Image: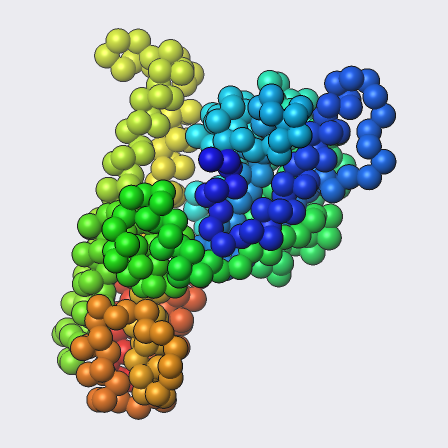
Amino acid sequence: MTVWDDLVGQERVSEVLTAAARDADALVTAAAADQPPPESSKMTHAWLFTGPPGAGRNQTARAFAAALQCVSPDRALGGAPGCGFCDGCHTVLIGTHADITTVAAVGAEILVKDMRDTVRKSYTSPATGRWQIILVEDAERLNEKSANAVLKAVEEPAPRTVWLLCAPSLEDVLPTIRSRCRHLNLSTPSVAAVADMLVRREGVEPQVAEAAARATQGHVDRARRLATDPAARARRAAVLKLPLRLDEVGACLKAAQELVDAAAEDAKQLAEEMDGKETEELKAALGAVQGGRLPRGTAGVIKDLEDMQKRRRTRTQRDSLDVALTDLTGFYRDVLALQLGSRVAIANADAEDALERLARAGSAEATLRRIEAIASCRDALDRNVAPLLAVEAMTMALRAG
């Protein structure tokens, strides 16, 4: 099993990255032997991975990072880097490699203060690995100042540093940054490819895997969670029942409150899993004595961690709401398909009775207005409108549509 096996439906991209990893290995090997570098190389110092949500941008970038740090002896025998089991691959994949720095948005933006240490590290030589790698998972969330900090580092990189940027599209990244990156665009995996992955890698029953892959329309992470987490399936089932409940104003307001509360509860559960562990690990690293008492001068570090965790909870709640809104959009898209007599496969086959009921009760124009109302709600959430206000406006529009 290699690092590329986790990339679903991205065979072309895997081939490009495998070739680049081979050339990167040749560059490092030549430098170690004090030999001149190869005359031509498919490796470059900055890469930009784009693609729709669920295509696996971050997974692809991390697989490439693992291949670049691969130390398998098979490489000397002509094997491709990225074995998946050597120390270099393993530590990258589990997130403990000393020469991999991952930057992800905690709140709405990646702030310049969050990038300063990362940019500084990008100019250092690898400590234990073959490359110093900076992986920016949410490059579209770089604000003006943090983007300019990245630009300077990408313009004048250290010889053994590689930047891996991930964003939904080219337009989401500063033009001066993207012009200095090699661009790879990922496509949405097919339903069959995602279902096959769930069966092989997660041990999911084929029927459950097929249903999860179809319901999420090829979104790998959401399909995995839907197939393996009963609570996620229950939340989705509740969302798909919502359109039939919006028959009066009180019902609309109640449905909005339930959606927001469910997202808050989801964020709380995730926070409980992560926050306590992070806090204890940081206290141990700071030298906390028995009883949890911290050394002098370290309270500010704990406060910074708590602030970061608070921002992450807010973003997690909004992300959970966005999943619900995506499910609603898919539901009304299926209604529209039925109204237009389309032969496009229905994603929410498990809600077919509700789909047919709404398709008969309304017009295609009304369904389009409802889809637009959901899109407006997502835009409002992106602009930091209070979640309850945004969702209440949406549910009222769904009723009136």
Percent across and percent down for residue 238 are 18, 63
Tell me the residue at 58%/27% (across/down).
Answer: 70
Tell me the residue at 83%/21% (across/down).
Answer: 35
Percent across and percent down for residue 139 are 56, 48
The answer to whether residue 121 of the structure is visible from this angle is: no
Q: Image quadrant for the C terminus?
A: bottom left
* Left or right: 342 as drawn, with respect to 179: left
Q: Nearer the viewer, residue 181 or 28?
A: 28
Percent across and percent down for residue 66 are 55, 33
* Left or right: 259 as drawn, with respect to 173: left
Tell me the residue at 40%/54% (across/down).
Answer: 194
- Vertical position of residue 184 compared to residue 280: above or below: below
- Vertical position of residue 18 compared to residue 9: above or below: above
Q: Nearer the viewer, residue 57 or 322?
A: 57
Q: Quadrant of residue 351?
A: bottom left
- Vertical position of residue 29 compared to residue 114: above or below: above
* Left or right: 125 as drawn, with respect to 260: right
How many numbered marks appear?
A: 0
